[in-house]
Amino acid sequence: MEVHSLLRRPFRYRYTNVALMLILVNVACYFFRTLAPREALYYFSMIPVRVARDGAFWQVFTYMFFHADLSHLFFNMLGLFFFGFQVEQRMGSTEFLLFYLLSGLVAGIFSFFVFYLSGAKGIILLGASGAIYAVLLAFAVFFPHAMIYVMGIIPVRAPILVMIYAGIEIFSQVFNVRGGVAHLTHLAGLGAAWVYFVVRLRINPLSVFFDRRY
């Protein structure tokens, strides 16, 4: 009982625009990467062999603040801008920060084990995509009737879009589509967010997605 109450103990609601701060941190890290590209990759991206051999355990966390190129940064931060602000307002800043960082951390740890055990020990993982996928799921749970315009044209309800994205990631992983993309990390971010909602917030996303009362 005590463990459950601790896991589900709510934070006092406050709003401090954490999503904007996260965007600024990611932008700052990108510029640091352009100034010291080798050092940034070596110390802050997630390289499984370094984590296991050198004890660089921080990399399963820091990888989510560094990006491969400007377009990688732009689209991740665009997702955080469009969805993160509204999710933060609904959750509160402290809850949102915990949710975002924990989802990205779980995605990083999961990716480390998968890559290391599959022999891809030298792969370089970086980017906030795992955490961004978590935020997208949170947006769909909190705003299940919201319409998202794909490519600015095609209207899709948020829960449907999440399921489409999950399906694309599973398909891409199974059939090795876009080999340079960490599909499993994206799926791990979705999975971490799902567990967070069920365990901490006591909300089953499926109940929201398929219950017309929401």
Image: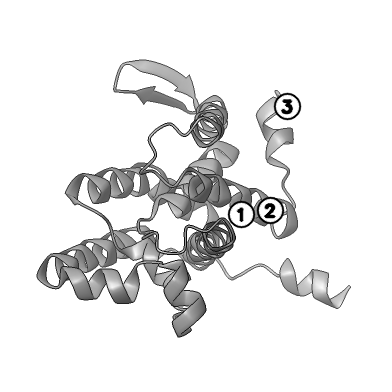
Q: Is residue 70 above or below residue 116?
A: above
Q: Which mark is residue 211?
A: 3
Residue 32, image x and y in percent?
17, 71
Secondary structure state at the residue bearing disc 3: loop
- Residue positioned 20% across, 51% down in the render: 69
Q: Is residue 1 visible?
A: yes
As shown in the figure, which amino acid type bears the numbered disc 1?
Ala
Between marks 1 and 2, how big is the CA–CA gap?
A: 5 Å
In front: 3, or 180? 180
**Which residue is at 73% across, 69% downward?**
7
Residue at 68% of width from left, 40% of height from top?
205
Q: Nearer the viewer, residue 205 or 179?
A: 179
Give the residue pinned by disc 2: 195
Image quadrant holding the C terminus, namely: top right
The x and y percentages for residue 165 are: 50, 31
How far across and how far down the image is residue 46, in percent? 41, 67
